[in-house]
Image (cartoon, rainbow, N blue to C red):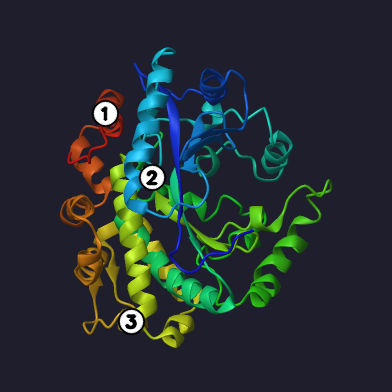
């Protein structure tokens, strides 16, 4: 395994749902998509710079960088080209891809089918332990960002910065305000169910914010060993592995020397997703270069978790009043909205972002998270007909790689 230094390369994963074009009903037909592309059903398809793969459920396809990518700026267009190709293939079946982190009308009890092909024994075991026919498993599309570290010294810096930034991420990326045609009361419903979808074995996700561990040895002792102990009674076949089981909002992958950030809801198009990814990367660089590492390391996961809960509810409108958290960033007032914090961070790193990325981020920073824009577009009319209309516009944004402004 080749090792990379901080921010040398990146890995991005984007998850999309297959739906019927006419009524947007969930379509568990990813195997048919892969068959159309490959001529056979495989779990992975390499398509140049981007790979396609199945997920736990039969209606979600994951697009990901095919190996480490050196340039985030190029990825928006590369992902977009693959989306156009997939939608062309799906059109023959009267299907299309749907963006955002949650389908607004899906009933997971009746609409969920597990993937029946490769890795199915792992998925079957997961289903036996956790019952995967719930929103937390079947209706949660996200973007993952993978960032490399070379050794313990780099892991310490990267993990310290990511832990502290995690609670603010739903304020940028929330896109899941509706389950089963009802407002949930959470702008980031995906993260709300993410917290509890493994409640049978709570140690797997912990407090979502990782514990204060800053070396490989400490990580194994504090996180992996308890996970392995907790899963043993369930995993009698010994087919589950701790890297796979760890469900914190950022997970250390020592098998590939990377940290994977998992708390970002999927946006309406790759241009928006990659703008957020580039913004997050530049803010993490700024934090590592300019903030006090020891102060970052002091913030406890319980404190960070309480901030995360605020952004899960209110996204950019969340009030952040935690004095130590604010002071780490150099903020001097006692209260800020999450949106105000992101606007300040944008000013710190804007000169590192290209024009298109800045424009995309300005939409989010001015008009609010995608959840806020979706709710505004729906207005008072929560009929299924209106939801189909608004979410079809979001599907059009995906097809055209443009941001949704309501």
The image quarter in which residue 79 lies? top left
Give the Cα distance between marks 2 and 3: 29 Å
Q: Earlier in the sequence, mark 1 or mark 2?
A: 2
Q: Which residue is mark 3?
A: 290
The image quarter in which residue 2 lies? bottom right
Foreground: 390 or 83? 83
Secondary structure of residue under mark 1: helix
Give the Cα distance between marks 3 and 1: 41 Å
Quadrant (top left/top right/bottom left/bottom right) for the N terminus: bottom right
Secondary structure of residue under mark 2: loop
Q: Where's residue 139, x and y in %?
A: 47, 38
In this rendering, does residue 137 appear at all? yes
- What is the crowding at mark 1: few (fewer than 14 residues within 10 Å), some, or many (at least 20)? many
Q: Which residue is mark 2?
A: 266
Answer left or right for 303 relative to 171. Answer: right
Residue at the right extreme of this rendering: 236
Q: Earlier in the sequence, mark 3 or mark 1?
A: 3
Foreground: 269 or 328? 269
Question: Which residue occupies 32% across, 54% down?
Answer: 276
Secondary structure of residue under mark 3: helix
Question: Which residue occupies 78% across, 50% down?
Answer: 234
Foreground: 168 or 54? 54
Answer left or right for 359 relative to 248. Answer: left
Answer left or right for 27 relative to 274. Answer: right
Give the Cα distance between marks 1 and 2: 15 Å
Q: Where's residue 56, x and y in %?
A: 59, 37
Q: Which residue is mark 1?
A: 396
């Amino acid at each position: 395994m080749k090792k990379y230094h901080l921010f040398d390369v990146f890995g991005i994963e984007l998850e999309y749902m297959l739906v019927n074009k006419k009524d947007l009903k969930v379509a568990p037909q990813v195997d048919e998509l892969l068959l159309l592309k490959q001529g056979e059903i495989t779990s992975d398809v390499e398509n140049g710079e981007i790979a396609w793969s199945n997920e736990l459920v039969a209606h979600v396809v994951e697009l990901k960088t095919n190996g480490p990518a050196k340039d985030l700026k190029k990825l928006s267009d590369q992902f977009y080209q693959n989306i156009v190709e997939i939608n062309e293939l799906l059109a023959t079946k009267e299907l299309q891809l749907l963006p955002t982190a949650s389908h607004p009308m899906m009933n997971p009890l009746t609409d969920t089918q597990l993937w029946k092909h490769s890795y199915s024994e792992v998925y079957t075991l997961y289903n036996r332990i956790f019952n995967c026919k719930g929103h937390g498993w079947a209706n949660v599309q996200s973007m993952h960002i993978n960032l490399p570290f070379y050794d313990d010294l780099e892991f310490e810096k990267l993990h310290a910065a990511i832990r502290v930034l995690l609670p603010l991420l739903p304020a940028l990326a929330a896109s899941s305000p509706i389950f089963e045609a009802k407002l949930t009361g959470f702008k980031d419903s995906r993260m709300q169910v993410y917290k509890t979808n493994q409640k049978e074995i709570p140690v797997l996700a912990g407090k979502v914010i990782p514990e204060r561990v800053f070396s490989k040895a400490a990580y194994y002792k504090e996180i992996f060993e308890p996970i392995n102990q907790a899963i043993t009674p369930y995993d009698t076949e010994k087919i589950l592995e701790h890297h796979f089981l760890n469900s914190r909002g950022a997970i250390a992958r020592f098998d590939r020397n990377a940290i994977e950030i998992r708390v970002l809801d999927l946006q309406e198009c790759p241009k928006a997703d990659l703008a957020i990814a580039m913004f997050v990367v530049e803010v993490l660089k700024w934090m590592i270069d300019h903030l006090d590492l020891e102060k970052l390391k002091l913030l406890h996961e319980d404190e960070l978790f309480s901030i995360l809960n605020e952004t899960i509810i209110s996204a950019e409108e969340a009030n952040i009043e935690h004095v130590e958290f604010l002071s780490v960033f150099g903020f001097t007032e006692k209260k800020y909205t999450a949106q105000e914090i992101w606007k300040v961070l944008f000013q710190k790193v804007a000169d590192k972002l290209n024009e298109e990325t800045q424009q995309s981020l300005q939409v989010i920073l001015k008009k609010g998270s995608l959840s806020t824009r979706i709710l505004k577009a729906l207005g008072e009319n929560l009929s299924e007909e209106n939801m189909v209309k608004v979410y079809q516009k979001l599907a059009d944004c995906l097809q055209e790689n443009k941001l949704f402004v309501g």
